[in-house]
C-alpha cells in the first residue's frame, strides 16, 4: 500500500509533468492579463485619488474583463505570442505596438455601450500603460543585460568603423552575445551628418582620419572595420590610423552572412594586405560564364596549384557536368579536392607524359580545358632550363595536341606577364607556350592564352615570404628598392579568366592589372599592418636575383593592345613565329633535353626571342613601333 509521502511525491511529479506540457505562451498570456488589469485599475484609482465612486466601480467591473480579452485577442492577432523574446528585435517591438494601438481603438469603441461607465482618461491612457507594461515584461532581459554591460564595461573596447548596416549589425551582436567579450564604445564614419548622433546607442563622433585620436580618447582596444566591400583606399586609411597607435584591426564577415546567421563576430578576421592592394571589383557577366560551363565536362591542369585550385572552385559554382582536376603533386591535388564538390574527379598525372595525357583526354573527353600546370619560379628556372622547357613548353604541346585530337571546344592557357618581352628562362618558356597554343589550334575552335601578373598570397610569392619573415622578427628581404610588380587577387584574376574563356575572343588576352606596386613600399606597409615599426623589423636589400626584371610590363615592345569589349580584359597582338620555325625550335629543345643540357636549352629559348624581336624591329613600320 502506498505511503502518504509516496503519494505526495507522485502527485508533485504529475503536477510538474503537467506544467511542462503547458505552452509557454499561456504563461505570457496570464502575465499580460495581470499587467492589463493592473494598468487600468491603477489609472482608475489615481483618477479619483484612491476614492472611486460606486457608480464607476460598477461600470469598471464590467469593462475590465472585456478590456483584458480585447488586449489578449489583439496580441494574438499581431503574433506577439511565439517569438523568443531574449532575441527580440525591432520587428517584435513593432508587433507589440500595433497590438497596443489596435486594442486602444477597440477599447474606445467600447465606450459607446452605456453600461461601461469608465472615465475617458482611463480608456485613453490605459492601452498605452498596458502596452508599456507588456513590453517591459518581454524586453526586460535585454534591457537589463544592456544595463549590466554598460555598468561592467568588460572585455575589449571596440571602435566600429562604419555607421551603416554592417556597423549596426555588429553592435547588436556585441550587445546580444556577452560571451564575445566585446563592448562597442564609439563609431567613426566619414559622413559629417552622422557626427553627434548615435548608432544603437553608441556615439558616432568623427571621421576615419581621426581614428588615432579616437583610440586614445575612448581607450579603444580594437578597431572593427564594418563596411562591406571597403575600398583599398578606405582600408589603408583605417590601417594607418590604427597601426599608429598599435591597435589591431579586424574585418567584419560579409554583411549578408552576418544578418542571416551564417557568420558571427567570432568569424572576424585580421586586416590583410589583400585588403590594401585589391581593386574595385570588375562586374563579371555570369550568364555568359554559366552558358560556357553549365553541364559541360571541364578539365583543369595544375588543379592543385594556387591558380588551378581557384579555377576549379569557381567552375564548380556554375554546376559543370563533370569537374576534373589534374596535377602531378599528390598532396596539392588532395588538398585542393577538399574544397570542391565530392563528385570532383582527381587525376594524378604529369603533363610531360605525352601518352598518359592522350589517354586521359580520350577517356574523359573534356569540353573545356583550363591549362594552368606550369613551373613559375624565375630564379630557380634560370639554372634549370630543361625543366622549364619540359613542363612549360613540351607539356603544353602535349595538352594542346590532346585537346585538338579530342575536339575540345574551348582551351584556355594560363600565361604570365613575364611572357611580354621576356628576359628570363621562365618568361621565354611561357612565351613559347603561347606560340604553341596559337599555332597549333584548329581554326574552328576557341583557343586562347590569358596573361596576368602576380596573384596575392600564391605559394612562394613575395607576400607569404614577407609574412613569415615578419613573424620571425625580421629582417624582411627586398631585392632592390626600385623593383615593382603587378598584383591582383586570385579570385578576381580567375573570375576574369572565366569571362575571357566564355567570350568570343581568342588569341593572346591580357588582364588589366592596374598600377604596379613598389616592393619596398609593400614590405613597409606589411610591417606596419602587423603592428610593428619598420626600424624594429628591419629591411635588407639582397640584389636582383637571376632572371628578375626591376620593372615588369604586360605588353612587349612590338606587341599591340586592342580592346575586347570585356571589362578588365584586352587583346594582345603578339609577334609570332611561323609554324615551320616553331617546329624547328621544338625539335632543337627536345635534343637539348635528351642531353640534359640546361645551358643550351636556356640559350635556345633566348635565341628564339632575339630572332623574333629582330624580325619585328625590321618589319614593323616606325609609326606602329612608336605606337606599340
Image (cartoon, grey):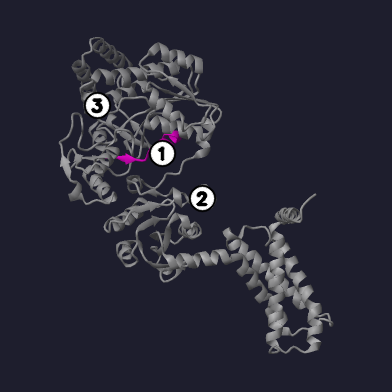
Image quarter of residue 427: top left
On the image, numbered disc 3 is attached to which residue? 616
Q: Residues within 10 Å of mark 2 (few under 14, many from 20)?
A: few
Boundaries of the magenta span:
485-500
For residue 491, the mark is 1
Q: From the viewer's perspective, is residue 582 above or below residue 486?
A: above
Q: Are marks 3 and 2 in contact (CB under 8 Å)?
A: no
Residue 390, position as x, y percentages in the image? 30, 17
Q: Is residue 488 magenta?
A: yes
Secondary structure category for the residue under label 3? helix
Q: Is residue 319 magenta?
A: no
Quadrant location of the C terminus in the rendered image: top left
Q: Residue at x 39, y 55 (%)?
A: 225
Q: Are marks 2 and 1 in contact (CB under 8 Å)?
A: no
* Residue at figure coordinates x 75%, y 78% from the top left: 108
- Please name the residue that numbered disc 2 is placed on: 256
Q: Nearer the viewer, mark 2 or mark 1?
A: 2
Above or below, 47 against 548 in this view is: below
* Residue 579 falls left or right of residue 341: left
Name the dominant secondary structure of the magenta segment: helix
Tell me how far mark 2 sits from mark 1, CA to CA: 19 Å
Helix, strand or loop at label 1? It is helix
Amino acid at each position: 500500500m502506498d505511503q502518504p509521502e509516496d503519494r505526495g511525491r507522485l502527485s508533485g511529479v504529475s503536477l510538474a509533468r503537467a506544467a511542462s506540457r503547458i505552452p509557454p505562451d499561456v504563461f505570457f498570456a496570464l502575465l499580460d492579463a495581470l499587467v492589463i488589469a493592473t494598468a487600468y485599475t491603477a489609472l482608475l484609482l489615481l483618477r479619483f485619488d484612491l476614492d472611486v465612486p460606486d457608480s464607476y466601480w460598477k461600470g469598471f467591473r464590467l469593462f475590465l474583463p472585456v478590456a483584458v480579452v480585447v488586449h489578449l485577442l489583439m496580441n494574438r492577432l499581431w503574433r506577439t505570442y511565439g517569438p523568443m523574446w531574449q532575441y527580440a528585435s525591432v520587428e517584435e517591438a513593432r508587433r507589440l505596438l500595433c497590438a497596443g494601438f489596435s486594442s486602444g481603438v477597440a477599447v474606445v469603441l467600447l465606450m459607446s455601450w452605456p453600461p461601461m461607465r469608465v472615465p475617458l482618461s482611463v480608456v485613453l491612457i490605459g492601452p498605452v500603460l498596458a502596452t508599456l507594461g507588456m513590453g517591459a515584461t518581454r524586453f526586460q532581459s535585454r534591457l537589463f543585460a544592456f544595463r549590466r554591460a554598460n555598468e561592467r564595461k568588460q572585455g575589449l573596447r571596440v571602435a566600429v568603423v562604419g555607421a551603416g548596416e554592417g556597423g549596426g549589425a555588429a553592435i547588436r551582436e556585441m550587445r546580444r552575445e556577452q560571451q564575445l567579450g566585446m563592448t562597442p564604445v564609439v563609431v567613426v564614419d566619414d559622413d559629417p551628418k552622422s557626427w553627434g548622433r548615435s548608432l544603437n546607442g553608441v556615439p558616432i563622433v568623427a571621421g576615419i582620419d581621426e581614428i588615432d585620436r579616437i583610440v586614445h580618447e575612448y581607450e579603444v582596444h580594437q578597431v572593427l572595420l564594418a563596411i562591406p566591400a571597403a575600398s583599398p583606399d578606405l582600408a589603408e586609411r583605417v590601417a594607418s590610423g590604427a597601426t599608429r597607435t598599435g591597435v589591431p584591426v579586424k574585418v567584419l564577415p560579409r554583411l549578408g552572412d552576418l544578418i542571416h546567421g551564417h557568420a558571427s563576430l567570432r568569424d572576424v578576421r585580421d586586416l590583410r594586405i589583400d585588403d590594401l592592394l585589391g581593386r574595385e571589383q570588375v562586374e563579371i557577366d555570369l550568364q555568359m560564364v554559366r552558358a560556357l560551363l553549365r553541364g559541360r565536362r571541364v578539365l583543369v591542369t595544375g588543379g592543385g596549384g594556387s591558380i588551378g585550385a581557384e579555377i576549379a572552385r569557381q567552375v564548380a559554382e556554375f554546376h559543370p557536368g563533370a569537374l576534373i582536376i589534374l596535377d602531378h603533386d599528390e598532396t596539392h591535388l588532395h588538398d585542393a579536392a577538399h574544397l570542391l564538390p565530392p563528385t570532383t574527379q582527381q587525376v594524378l598525372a604529369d603533363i610531360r607524359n605525352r601518352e598518359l595525357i592522350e589517354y586521359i583526354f580520350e577517356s574523359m573527353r573534356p569540353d573545356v580545358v583550363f591549362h594552368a600546370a606550369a613551373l613559375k619560379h624565375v630564379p630557380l628556372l634560370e639554372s634549370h632550363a630543361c625543366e622549364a622547357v619540359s613542363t612549360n613548353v613540351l607539356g603544353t604541346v602535349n595538352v594542346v595536341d590532346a585537346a585538338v585530337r579530342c575536339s575540345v571546344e574551348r582551351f584556355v592557357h594560363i600565361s604570365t606577364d613575364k611572357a611580354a618581352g621576356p628576359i628570363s628562362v621562365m618568361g621565354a618558356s611561357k612565351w613559347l607556350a603561347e606560340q604553341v597554343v596559337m599555332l597549333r589550334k584548329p581554326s574552328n575552335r576557341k583557343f586562347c592564352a590569358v596573361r596576368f601578373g602576380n596573384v596575392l598570397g600564391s605559394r612562394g610569392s613575395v607576400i607569404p615570404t614577407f609574412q613569415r619573415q615578419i613573424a620571425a622578427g625580421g629582417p624582411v628581404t627586398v631585392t632592390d628598392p626600385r623593383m615593382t610588380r603587378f598584383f591582383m587577387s586570385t579570385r578576381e584574376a580567375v573570375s576574369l579568366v572565366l569571362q575571357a574563356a566564355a567570350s568570343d575572343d581568342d588569341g593572346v588576352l591580357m588582364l588589366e592589372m592596374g598600377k604596379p606596386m613598389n616592393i619596398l613600399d609593400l614590405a613597409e606597409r606589411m610591417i606596419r599592418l602587423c603592428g610593428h615599426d619598420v626600424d624594429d623589423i628591419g629591411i635588407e636589400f639582397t640584389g636582383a636575383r637571376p632572371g628578375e626584371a626591376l620593372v615588369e610590363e604586360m605588353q612587349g615592345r612590338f606587341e599591340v593592345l586592342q580592346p575586347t569589349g570585356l571589362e578588365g580584359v584586352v587583346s594582345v597582338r603578339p609577334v609570332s613565329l611561323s609554324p615551320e620555325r616553331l617546329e624547328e625550335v621544338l625539335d632543337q629543345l627536345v635534343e637539348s633535353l635528351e642531353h640534359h643540357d640546361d645551358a643550351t636549352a636556356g640559350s635556345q629559348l633566348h635565341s628564339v626571342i632575339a630572332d623574333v624581336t629582330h624580325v619585328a624591329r625590321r618589319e614593323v613600320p616606325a609609326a606602329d613601333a612608336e605606337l606599340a
